[in-house]
Amino acid sequence: MGSAGHRRRGLSDLAQVRHLDYRNVTETGFDAVSSIGLTEHIGKTQLPGYFGFLYSKLRPEGRLLNHCITRPDNTGPARVTDGFIYRYVFPDGELEAGYLVSLMHDAGFEVRHSENLREHYARTLAGWCANLEAHWDEAVAEVGDGTARVWRLYMAGSRLGFERNQIQLHQVLGVRLGEAGSPACRCGPTGSRQRQACGRPQSRTGRAPARPPVASGNHERQSSAWLRLSLGSHTVS
Ligand SMILES: C[S@@+](CC[C@H](N)C(=O)[O-])C[C@H]1O[C@@H](n2cnc3c(N)ncnc32)[C@H](O)[C@@H]1O
């Protein structure tokens, strides 16, 4: 959803949409970062810097959810340059494997949870394919026959790839630990209500942890700050 969408839904006070390179986000102290479908564009050699940067953006006990298409094992190359997808859909794209978790550890995260949504993503793609077929004429009118056909083939092929375990979809949750390794939990996104509900101790002393410094501007008025990297745009809320 872009800025106009946020305005229409009355969310302007709660969220911002920015179109920029993720490395140009200057604020720090976020409660959470979700990176959706971006890792495929980072490149294996840049991954330590990527995870290190996101780690540096979080407050202590802040969380990163890293969601990306992955390879089922590490026996093949991350970058396959002679295929249809590389040529027509994701030039310079790379699919990483299980070492993503190790790299998150090495960047300082405690990895709390990892989930493979492979079959679910096949179903999502089946839905997208059906939607494209149902609106084929509109799609062609909007992007042209060639682009529409590329995406029809790409999505149908990706559905098969997920079904046959040629590709996977991993969501990995990592936490920047607080002082003295204070624990985190997988409960709700931010608020103290969720923390109390899960019974997690607030801190070693029993006192609630100090509110983390949050970013300037709109963020000061908010009870939480999220950074979402998605669709090439960044919603900082
Ligand atoms: C595969 S798409 C993911 C789209 C969407 N989040 C999804 O999951 O359907 C990857 C997006 O990452 C963006 N991207 C690549 N490198 C980036 C960077 N350095 N900073 C910000 N966005 C980037 C691309 O522009 C593209 O829109």
Image (cartoon, rainbow, N blue to C red):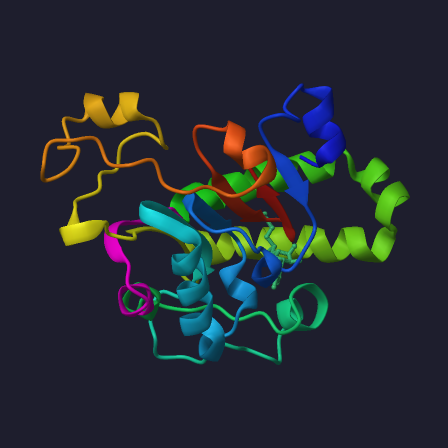
Give percent across and percent down for residue 223: 43, 28
Q: Residue at x 48, y 58 (%)?
A: 161
Q: Is residue 176 above or below residue 142?
A: below
Q: Where is residue 23 in the image (x, y as percent from the top left)?
A: 57, 63
State the residue in front, 215 or 69: 215
Work out which quarter of the rendered image holds the N terminus and state it: top right
Residue drawn at 41 percent across, 64 percent down: 51
Residue located 51% across and 49% down the image:
36
**In the figure, residue 203 lies in which quadrant?**
top left
Give yes or no for residue 115 being in the magenta stretch. Answer: yes
Tell me where residue 3 appears, x and y as whole percent: 72, 34
Quarter location, residue 10: top right
> What residue do we see at 48% from left, 68% from top?
95
In the visual, does 91 lie left or right of 148? Answer: left
Can residue 173 be seen here? The reply is yes
Q: Nearer the viewer, residue 99 or 128?
A: 99
Horizontal and vertical percent for residue 157?
Answer: 58, 57
Image region (quadrant) for ligand 1? bottom right
Residue bounds of the magenta highlight: 103-117
Residue 147 against residue 134 in the figure, above or below: below
Q: Does the magenta stretch include residue 54?
A: no
